[in-house]
Image (cartoon, rainbow, N blue to C red):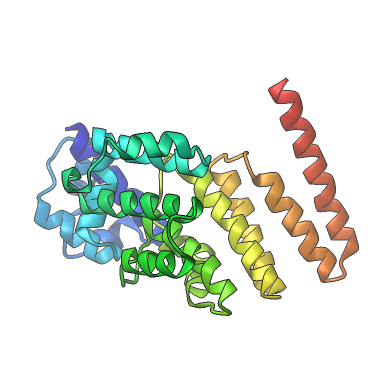
Amino acid sequence: MEIIQNIAEAIDILRISKGLTVNELCLNICDESSYRRYKSGNRDIPIARIKLFCDRLGIGLDDFLYNVTAKNSHEYKKIYKLFYELQNKNYDQIRKTLQTIHIEDIALDKNKILYQYIVYTYEYETKRITTSEYFSFMNELLPLKNGFYTFNDIVILEKIAWIEMEQKGSKALEKLQAILLDPKKLYPINNHHAVIATIYANTVNLLTKNGDFKTALNICERGIAYSKKYNVTKNIHHLYYLKAYLFFQNDDKDAAMINISIVISLVITNKLFKE
């Protein structure tokens, strides 16, 4: 019953993020009392009905089930541990771990995609492949779709956007900013909110380099709101610093100084907390 309840709760989270009422979600699928029983774990949800919910919410059934059920698997945990080693640039540990994982042994396609992302990014950052090769690999990993975007999609798009910036392109950046500006397009990513908050900051940097200060400020404010919503404290001072810089560029020095004072307060608070 716990798995069924987790599925029902995940459906409800998506319903809320889409701005749908229970009645709107359940229309021609089931009655509201059945929906409440699904949420309480008192009734099984037929797979056909889960698919109908997913269709209405705009997410593929495979993506939905992966995000709900796969996170408790040993395979998932091992690959995500490797991902965070990459975030921290622990290349020696990555090299050792990669020797123990073989892609043909990875059962789930989503895990294979993230594993390949890790391998290619590790090889690129350690100068084993060229920028052109890395760019090609990243584009091969990115699925062509609309609707909800998952953790894999977001981290891959960010890498493509950075390379495109060097090549005077902006397709990935445009898609990335559209996702970050509309939370309804971003599948709730439990336990990885700090990564998404960092991607908000990195996207602001990219837009600033492009001279698009207005969109950068909008993304920055959304990133701060996202960080507060999910209690992400690691990089929120960076977002406030970027916000101050953008206000300064718009010649709003008073707003810039207010945000600089917030940065100083956050840094001091964080330092005192660590002590």
Query: In which image quadrant can residue 140 be found?
Result: bottom left
- From the viewer's perspective, is 133 left or right of 215? left
Coordinates of residue 217 in the picture (x, y in percent): 69, 65
Q: In which quarter of the image is the N terminus?
A: top left
Residue 6, relative to residue 249: is it above or below? above
Residue at 40% x, 67% y: name it: 133
**Is residue 30 visible from the viewing direction of this image?**
no
Q: Is residue 241 above or below residue 170?
A: above
Residue 184 visible in rendering: yes
Query: Is residue 110 rendered to the left or right of residue 215?
Result: left
Question: Could you say where residue 156 lies in the image, as x and y percent from the top left?
Answer: 42, 60
> For the view shown, which residue lies furthest in the front direction?
128
The image shows residue 163 at horizontal and vertical percentages of 52, 68
* Rendered location of residue 166, percent (x, y): 59, 73
What residue is at 28 percent from the left and 39 percent from the top?
Answer: 76
Instruction: Identify which residue, 27 or 190, lies in the foreground.
Output: 190
25 to the left or right of 262:
left
Q: Residue at x 60, y 58 (%)?
A: 202
Residue at coordinates 66% horizontally, 75% vertically from top-left? 210
Residue 170 position by quadrant: bottom right
| Snapshot quadrant of residue 203 | bottom right
**Quick one: quadrant of the C terminus?**
top right
Picture layout, residue 19 above or below residue 235: below
Q: Nearer the viewer, residue 228 or 195?
A: 195
